[in-house]
Image (cartoon, grey):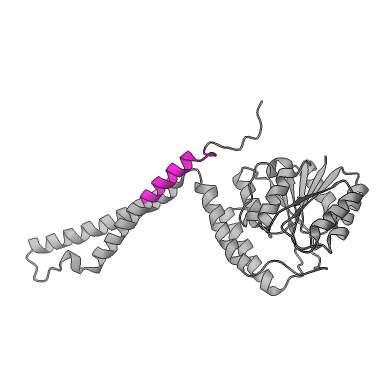
Amino acid sequence: MNISVVVPLYDEVESLPELTSWISQVMNDNSFTYEIILVDDGSKDGSWEMIKKLRQHNQNIKGIKFRRNYGKSAALNTGFDAAQGDVVITMDADLQDSPDEIPELYRRITEEHYDLISGWKAKRYDPISKTVPTRLFNAATRKMSGIDNLHDFNCGLKAYRKAVVKNIEVYGEMHRYIPVIAKWAGFSRIGEQVVEHRARKYGKTKFGLSRFVNGFLDLLSIFFVGKFGKRPMHFFGSMGTLSFLAGTICAIWIIVDKLNGLANHAKHVRDVTAQPLFYIALVAIILGSQLFLTGFVAELVARSGSDRNKYQVEEIL
C-alpha cells in the first residue's frame, strides 16, 4: 500500500464527507493505493455514525473510536499503530489542511528519501492570539532541539516514512513535537514543505490557551527524556555534585576565615553560624545530596524499566 492517511478528529461530523471525498479524489487521480484511518477521539456530535456511513461507500475508509476524549496525541499514536502504508500522512479533520499537498509530500519521502516532512503554513488564517504564542514556541523548540530548518513544528499536515511512525511513541500532548521525538529516535532526515492553510469551514477550534502552557511543559519533558532518559544520573548527579561542592567550599572558607582570625587575635571574629553565607552553604550541601539521591533512584527506575535496553535498530543483515 502506498499511503495511509491518519486523521484524528473530535466533533467534526460536518467536514468528514467533504474531507474523505477530497482525499479519495486525489488518491485516484494519482493512482495511489491508500487507506484513510479516521480516529474518533470521543466525539459526541455523530461523527462515528458518519464514519460508518462513509465506509459503506468507500472501503478504503477505516475507523477507530475511543470511548472518551483522550487527546490528539493518543489518536495519532493509535492511528500510527494501525497504518499499513509505506508513507503515512497526517492531517486535521477541519479542512484547514489541503489533501492536494499529498502527492508532493509522497514524492519527497519516496524520491528524496526524507524520514519526515513537516508542513509550514507560511500564510495563516488564525487569530493573533494563536499565531504569536505559536511563533514563540517554534523558536524555543528550534533552539532546544537543534532542528533549525523547521518553522512550524505543530502543523497537522506531515508525511512520514513507515519506519518512523512504527518506532516512535506519542503520548500526553507530545504531538506538537513529533519532529523532535523522531530526531531523538535517530530519524534525522527531516524536511519542510510550505503548505496551504485554509480558513475553518465548519465548527470551531477545540484548542484553548491552556495548550500553550502544556506545550512548554511537554517541550521540557521531551528535552529531558530524550537526552537523559537512559542515564538520569548524568543530569541529577552532575547538578547535585556541583551544588554539594559549592556548599562545601563555602563552608570550608567560612571556617578557615574564622580560624585565621582567632590565630591572629582579631578583635571581631564572627561565629560561623552568625554568617548568612553559612546557611546558604548548608542549603547547597543539602540540595546537592538530595539531587544526587534523586539521580540514584532515577537510575534504579531506568534500569528496571522494560525498555532499558530498547534501542533503534535500522537494519540487520
Q: Note whether 131 is above or below 32 in the view shown.
A: below
Q: Is residue 283 left or right of residue 59?
A: left
Q: Position of residue 37 (x, y in %)?
A: 79, 49
x and y percent of residue 63 in the render? 79, 50
Which residue appears at 88% of the width and 48% of the height?
27
Which secondary structure class fits the magenta region best?
Answer: helix
169 falls in the magenta region: no
Where residue 281 sits: x, y (%)?
A: 27, 61
- Give the residue drawn at x 63%, y 62%: 138
Q: Quadrant of residue 220?
A: bottom right
Q: Quadrant of the C terminus?
A: top right
Total number of numbered labels? 0
> Would you identify the image quadrant in which residue 97 lies?
bottom right
Q: Give residue 236's position: percent from left, percent from top.
A: 41, 51
Q: Is residue 317 above or below residue 87?
A: above
| Quarter of the rendering occupied by the N terminus | top right
Left or right of residue 311, residue 297 in this image? left
Residue shown at 87% from the left, 50% from the top: 55
Q: Nearer the viewer, residue 45 or 82?
A: 45
Q: Residue furthest left?
A: 265
Residue nearest the observer in this picture, 280 or 252: 280
188 displayed left or right of 27: left
299 part of magenta stretch: yes
Judged from this view, the residue extending furthest toward the top is 317
* Magenta stretch in the rendered image: 292-308
Residue 148 in sight here: no
